[in-house]
Image (cartoon, rainbow, N blue to C red):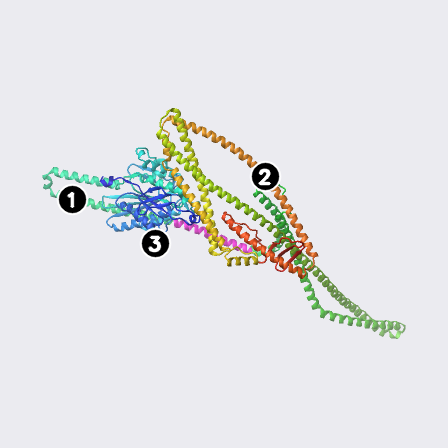
Amino acid sequence: MSNEEAKVIPVRVALRCRPLVPKEINEGCQGCLTFVPAEPQVIVGTEKTFTYDYVFDPTAEQDEVFNTAVAPLLRGLFKGYHATVLAYGQTGSGKTFSMGGTYTSAQENDPSVGVIPRVIRRIFEERDKMAECDFCLTVSYLEIYNEDILDLLSASKDKPGISIREDPKDGIKIVGLTERQVFSAQEMVGCLEVGNSARTVGSTAMNAASSRSHAIFTITLEQRRGPDKVDSVVSKFINFAINRGLLSLGNVISALGDESKKNTFVPYRDSKLTRLLQDSLGGNSHTLMIACISPADSNMEETINTLRYADRARKIKNKPIVNVDPRAAETSRLKQQVQELQVMLLHARGGHLFSRPESAEKVSKLLERNRALQDENNKLSRELSEAAGQTAFMFEKIIMTEQANEKLQSKLEQLQHHEACTVDLEKLLETLEDQELKENVEVMRNLQDIILELKNESAGIAASIEAMAAGEEVPEDATVSKDSPEGFSTHHALRQAQLSKELIELNKVLSLKEAFVRNMCQNDSQLEPMQSEHQKNVVTLQSAVESLQKEKDDLVLALQSAKKDTNQAKLSEQRRKRLQELEGQLVDMKKKLLEQSKLIKLKESSVQRVSKLMQEIQAMKTQRTQLMRQMRDDSEKHLLFCFFSQDRKRQYELLKLERDFQKQANVLRRKTEEAAAANKRLKDALQKRSEVADKRKDVHNKGTEGAAARVKTWFLNEVEVMVSTEEARRHLSDLLDDRKVLAQEINHLKQQLEAGERPAPKIRRRTLIISELESHGALETPLTKQVENLETEMGLRNAQIADLQQKLLLADSEGRLKQRIDAISNIMEAKCALRVLMSELVSAKTASSKLESEVKQEKGNSQDLRKMLAEDRNVMSTMDMEHQQQMVELEQRHQEKVPPPSEEELEKLRELSEQNQKLVEQNEQYTQKLSLLHLASGKKILMPTIKNEKSPDESFEYVPPKVGYQVLFFVTFPFIVGFWIA
């Protein structure tokens, strides 16, 4: 072994800091790191300094990271050394981005690609330069999730379990892991893409697609420099995730990096991750650890943990050596030994060697032939290996193609079945279309009745849910009262639905009757010429009947006279026949006359029916007008009720916002005071701890009582420091949350200033006021001032956050736990500390129990008060609704009685309207000021709005009463204006 092979080198550590992300910028986060120019150092806060091999600030590009930190490992890779690159850091710190874990072939020329794609490209570039050597490249990709090893390159999901084996010669081996031989950079990138798509990811608060497992991408490079020398080196690229495997990794790093634990046991077997990294940490490998951190002060604690983690890893020592295939090395050694023995044998034989030159020549030929056969054997072995790799790859493609073909075949069968079903359904629909249309009409009618019932039930359920959400107890038989706002609206909606249903039915009947009347009128118009003709026929028939009757009477007289005269028998017979004919004609004429009379009567009845239908239609139209007027009156009443209710809610919201603003201002003031007090307590505790440490140095041994007093003082001081530290952390978290809210409000106000956005106006007068205020700069100035005030408040929060973080750095240093343990030097001090600990624990438990009982009692009192308050609110709401309804009814009655206003009254109305407008402007200004104040407190103002806007002029304003004269002006629709004068 050469000196180079025996050289001990430490693990290299590269620190990489990402820029602030938009989410952190919007939350107002500040940078907590300072990078020393031209030095691999970083300063946390103001005093804590860390030094590493490489430090990359947020402006560093991927190319700089690769060329500076990773490229030296690749140079050693082609010399026969193992290489490992680790990426560690908190969620969202840039590990996957740095390693290139989401790389695809479409990003080939993208400058933001990570380490792994650049390594793949560089390996194949170096291979092409070394034409005298033969290379064999294989890759594997695995992940460790919940202590289970998953093969990311396996096409089958039923692959048997993967196990870890340790070979004394070859080191750690993974049994059952898929290894693919690759011949180009595209094939290796394809393996990387396949593995990346199979990785386990999850959503976190910092990263929507966070890697939830440890991933290890391994490239094995087998290099042949000659017939007997084979180098096999491994390059590993590891991306860590946050899980329990890191605890074992931390223990391994602590055991390897601590000089005091140099000869202690290294717990490699505590997890599968540390077993796989056994060669990379403290073994035979060139190792680089990329520690990824965030510069935001909100992640300062995680950043410090990462920096300490990387600092311990930098103390690990590795012993990399050139890796040679053991079989090839053994073969070369044996051949060399055979040659040496042959030389020794030839020297021992002496003259016999030179007396037989043909034997020496034969031996040399055999050796040359042996070498040629070995070269040919090696070449055939490589070709066989390549062919086997290509065969396996083609088999995988065939299997994937067959699977895709089966899926397509199943989809084709489904589509064919679906098409057949579609044809059957079309036939069935054609046969059942008429029946469905008839059934749908009946179903629609039934559904209308069911909808009305469900609306009533849903209104009751909604009221119960709202009451339960508000923390009130709802009785089982609770229903929506008409006196409540929800009950009034529900009753109004149900009544409107009922009236609408009646109106629809009335319109249907009316349309049917009108159609029937039109048909009858059309038939009558067609029958008019027939009627005149029938009347003429009736007159003709009547005259014919009369003439026939007269002729009949004459014939009867003639027959009677002929009976007396016997000579006229023949003539009588003729007259008798004529009489029968006349009687038949007379019967026919009477029948025709009767039919004509019936037709005339039918026409008269038709006219009467049409007249009756017209009267019914007129009555229905009158009823429809009444229904529409009733619906409009109900809508006006409901609109008035909503206006009254919204005005009352608006006044209540204004008062509530004032109280909330004052309350939040008090809370912010209290939080600031508590943070300052916690900072002061922490500072005092640190100072007191240093004083106690000095006293312990001055007076070390003063007997048992003195030791007990010292231990108690020290112990209580340490407890106070720890409590102050935790309180400072809690206040720091509160300050970070407050700063986040302030940053959101500042961004919101700046967007309003830049875009000039305003809330949609409800009335034209308000739009006029806003435009006038904008023209005079009355709106821009408060917003700008508000932004300045919030930015000042943000600066104050940043200063407090930085101060607390610096104090926490001093109080929670890395060696603090060790100092606490080393402070107890003997068993007597340990017993004293245990006694003090038990006493403090009993006191804390007693105080906690007392506080819990007090909290329970206060909760019971609070619940009783809430119930009483809910009951009082219900009573007040009911009384208020009754009062508002009475006002609306009185107003409507008064509107019916009061005559139209005179010119003087109209003039007074105009004056009062102007006064009302001034009050509206004052109210708007007050609302805007209150909105700005409320934005400063971190909440949005909630103003009551009307969802169903009828007109841009829709509004309701109330004018304070004057002596003897009161006006209430309202606009419901553009064409309905009402006045109430008292």
Q: Position of residue 709 (x, y in %)?
A: 40, 27
In magenta segment, residue 403: yes
Amino acid type, callout 1: Ser
User: Considering depth in this image, is 683 or 407 the residue closer to the camera?
Assistant: 683
Q: Which residue is mark 2?
A: 865
What span is in magenta?
400-427
The answer to which of marks 3 and 2 sits earlier in the sequence is 3
* Element on which disc 2 rests: helix
Give the numbered dot on residue 109: 3
Which residue lies at the image location 45% right of the left edge and 30% below the top edge? 840
In magenta segment, residue 409: yes
Residues under labels 3 and 2: Cα distance?
69 Å
Residues under labels 1 and 3: Cα distance?
55 Å
Q: Position of residue 692 (x, y in %)?
A: 38, 32
Q: Position of residue 675 (x, y in %)?
A: 45, 40
Q: Is residue 711 left or right of residue 966?
A: left
User: Considering depth in this image, is 31 or 624 the residue closer to the camera?
Assistant: 31
Camera-near label (3 vs 2) is 2
Q: Is residue 64 left or right of residue 551?
A: left
Residue 120 sits above or below residue 344 on the image: below
Residue most extreme to the front: 963
Give the main secondary structure, helix, strand or loop, of the magenta stretch. Answer: helix
The answer to which of marks 1 and 3 sits earlier in the sequence is 3
The answer to which of marks 1 and 2 sits earlier in the sequence is 1
Label 2 packing within 10 angstroms: few (<14), some (14-19), many (20+) = few
Residues under labels 1 and 2: Cα distance?
111 Å
Q: Which residue is mark 1?
A: 364
